[in-house]
């Protein structure tokens, strides 16, 4: 059961109120992804850069769908 609680849950965050994130490898703009992590027994949101969609980038991740 503990492993189920610690699975990564990601959603694309709306851009309002958050600065535009950039890919560290190529500098292209990327989506902001909200992940959740457990802190003191509760889940808290954590905004992180999403995958790069630039096909020329070494960190390229094709879109799902």
Image: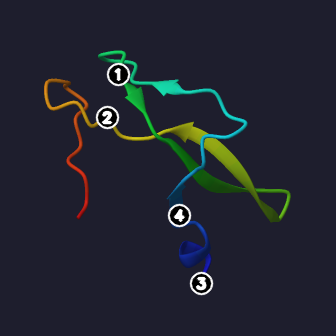
Gap in angstroms between the C-alphas marked 1 and 4? 24 Å
Cα–Cα span, label 2 and label 1: 7 Å
Q: Residue furthest right?
A: 40
Q: Residues within 10 Å of mark 2 (few under 14, many from 20)?
A: many
- Left or right, 33 with respect to 63, comes to right
**Which-is-in-front pick, marks 2 and 4?**
2
Residue labelled with disc 4: 9
* Residue 62 image point, x, y percent: 20, 48
Q: Is residue 16 left or right of residue 50?
A: right
Query: Can you name the residue that lies furthest to the left here?
Result: 56
Question: Are the residues at dot 2 and dot 1 in contact (C-beta closer than 8 Å)?
Answer: yes
Q: Which mark is residue 52?
A: 2
Judged from the image, the secondary structure of the residue bearing numbered disc 2 is loop
Mark 3 in CB contact with mark 2 (< 8 angstroms)? no
The quadrant in which the C terminus is found is bottom left
* Badge 3 or badge 2: first in the primary sequence: 3
Residue 47 bears which disc, if any?
A: none
Residue 6 occupies which quadrant of the picture? Answer: bottom right
Label 1, residues with CA under 10 Å away: few <14, some 14-19, many ≥20: few
Q: Nearer the viewer, mark 1 or mark 4?
A: 1
Q: Residue at x 67, y 40 (%)?
A: 16
């Amino acid at each position: 059961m503990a492993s189920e609680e610690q699975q990564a849950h990601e959603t694309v965050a709306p851009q309002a109120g958050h600065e535009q994130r950039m890919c560290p490898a190529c500098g292209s703009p990327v989506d902001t992804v909200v992940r959740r992590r457990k802190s003191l027994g509760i889940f808290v949101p954590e905004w992180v850069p999403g995958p790069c969609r630039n096909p020329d980038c070494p960190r390229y991740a094709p879109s799902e769908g």
